[in-house]
Image (spheres, rainbow, N blue to C red):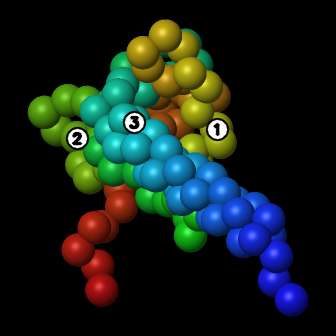
Amino acid sequence: MIKPRHVLVAGLAAGVLLAFANLASAQGLALEGREVRASDGAVLGTIAKVITGADGRPLQVLVQPKGARAAGPRSLPYKALSPEGDRFVIPLSKAEFDSMPAVDLEAK
C-alpha cells in the first residue's frame, strides 16, 4: 500500500529534479555570448551555442572565433573551460585553437 508520506517524498524528488534540469538549461543559456580566452590570455572568441546532455548539463560549447576572417565555430568540451571572472579560459594556445576544424552546423 502506498502511504501519503511516500507520495510526498516522490513529489518532492520530482520537483527537485525538474528544478535542477531547469537550472542546468538556464546555465547553458547564460554561457552563450561569454568570451573564451587561450591559456596565454589571447581572445579566442565567444560561446555561440551550448550543447547539453539528456540531463540538461552542458557537454560541449561551440566557440565562434574572433576576427573578420574567422571560419565557423570550434567545438570545445565544457569541462575544459575554467571560469575566470565573466569569461572562460581553456588550456589551448591561440594557434592550437585556430588549427582546429570548424564545425559545419548545416551538415546532415
Q: Amino acid at mark 1?
A: Ala
Look at 35% across and 28% down and name the residue there: 34
Residue 104 sits in quarter: bottom left
Q: Amino acid at mark 2?
A: Ala
Question: Where residue 20 sits: x, y (%)?
Answer: 58, 50
| Closer to us: 84 or 3 | 3
The label nearer to you, 1 versus 2, is: 1
Give the number of the disc on residue 53.
none
Q: Residues within 10 Å of mark 1 (few under 14, many from 20)?
A: some
Q: Which one is earlier in the sequence, the residue at label 1 or at label 2?
A: 2
Q: Which residue is mark 1?
A: 80
Q: Is 89 placed left or right of 31 in the picture?
A: right
Give the number of the disc on residue 70.
2
> Are circles 1 and 3 on residues that touch, CB within 8 Å?
no
Residue 68 sits in quarter: top left
Q: Which one is earlier in the sequence, the residue at label 2 or at label 3?
A: 3
Q: Is 53 placed left or right of 71 in the picture?
A: right
| Closer to us: 27 or 31 | 27
Question: Where residue 33 sits: x, y (%)?
Answer: 28, 33
Circle 3 — which element? helix
Circle 1 — which element? helix
The label nearer to you, 1 versus 3, is: 3
* Label 2 – label 3 distance at C-alpha: 21 Å
Residue occupying the far left of the picture:
68
The label nearer to you, 2 versus 3, is: 3
Rendered view: 106 above or below 35: below
Q: Which residue is mark 3?
A: 31
